[in-house]
Amino acid sequence: MQLQAPYHHHHNTIMVPPSPLSTSLRGFTSSISLLLQSHINENRGIVAERPLGFNSIDGRLVRRRRKEFGIVASSNVAAPLWDAWKPEKGSAAPSLSDVLWPSAGAFVVMAILGKIDQMLAPKGISMTIAPLGAVSAVLFAAPSSPAARKYNVFMSQISCAAIGVLALTIFGPGWLARSAGLAASIAFMIYTRSTHPPAASLPILFIDGAKLHHLNFWYAFFPGATGCILICLIVSSFSSPLLMLHLIAKET
């Protein structure tokens, strides 16, 4: 009987030492990537925290950067895009009075405007226009917003309405007048710092509303600005009872 010794294949592995050039290139590449990442994080206002391995000196640097630039993020992950589709996290649920009083105020505004329409019907004039509904929403639901300031309301209402009349006079009815009137109104509100979104619809309303053309430049004061005076008076009358309710709720 013949015994056969197992035959083993021996593979010789040749270890090639890394060249100095490749080592320096890798180091240079990693340094560039770190610099780019830190630059991106700075532009985004993202602050890296202690879990990433910063020592106490880096922690003081982070706190100083927060103080200087107002950075309050606590992670290096950007907020998801769908956060804008959800209610604000820090906002509390509105109270019953915060819901009922603005709604009641808007109801009173439309009721009074409807009554005025009945009196003005023989003259073919109407006070109830869609932009006044948007004005009511701004003044009742967000009275502390910049758009609710009296300067913004009346400066934009009068000027944007006049811009609509001017656009119709220059370009005639059609898409060009609507586009030019809207663009000029937005530019005017930004330039004069009187942004009031409901006023941007006044030029389009005048250009497309044939029953308003006979008002000509009186449209700058009626019905938009006149309706805003009425709404502001109703808001003022509603604000005092609302303030009293808030004070009573705090005391109880």
Image (cartoon, helix red, strand yellow):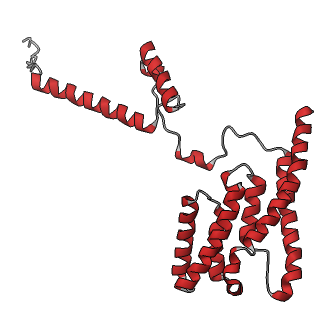
* Image quadrant where one finds the N terminus: top left
Identity of the residue drawn at 66% across and 52% down: 146
Decide if residue 201 is in sight here.
no
In the figure, is residue 169 to the left or right of 100? left
* Image quadrant where one finds the C terminus: top right
Identity of the residue drawn at 31% across and 34% down: 36
In the figure, is residue 202 to the left or right of 116? left
Task: Count the numbered circles shown.
Answer: 0
In the figure, is residue 187 to the left or right of 121? left
Rendering coords of residue 72 (x, y %): 54, 31
In the figure, is residue 66 to the left or right of 150? left
Q: In which quarter of the image is residue 232?
A: bottom right
Identity of the residue drawn at 8% across and 19% down: 14
Judge by depth and name the residue closer to the eye, 70 or 252.
70
- 178 w.r.t. 232: above or below: below
- 147 w.r.t. 109: above or below: above
Rendering coords of residue 132 (x, y %): 75, 68
Decide if residue 38 is in sight here.
yes
Q: Quadrant of residue 52?
A: top left
Rendering coords of residue 110 (x, y %): 84, 68
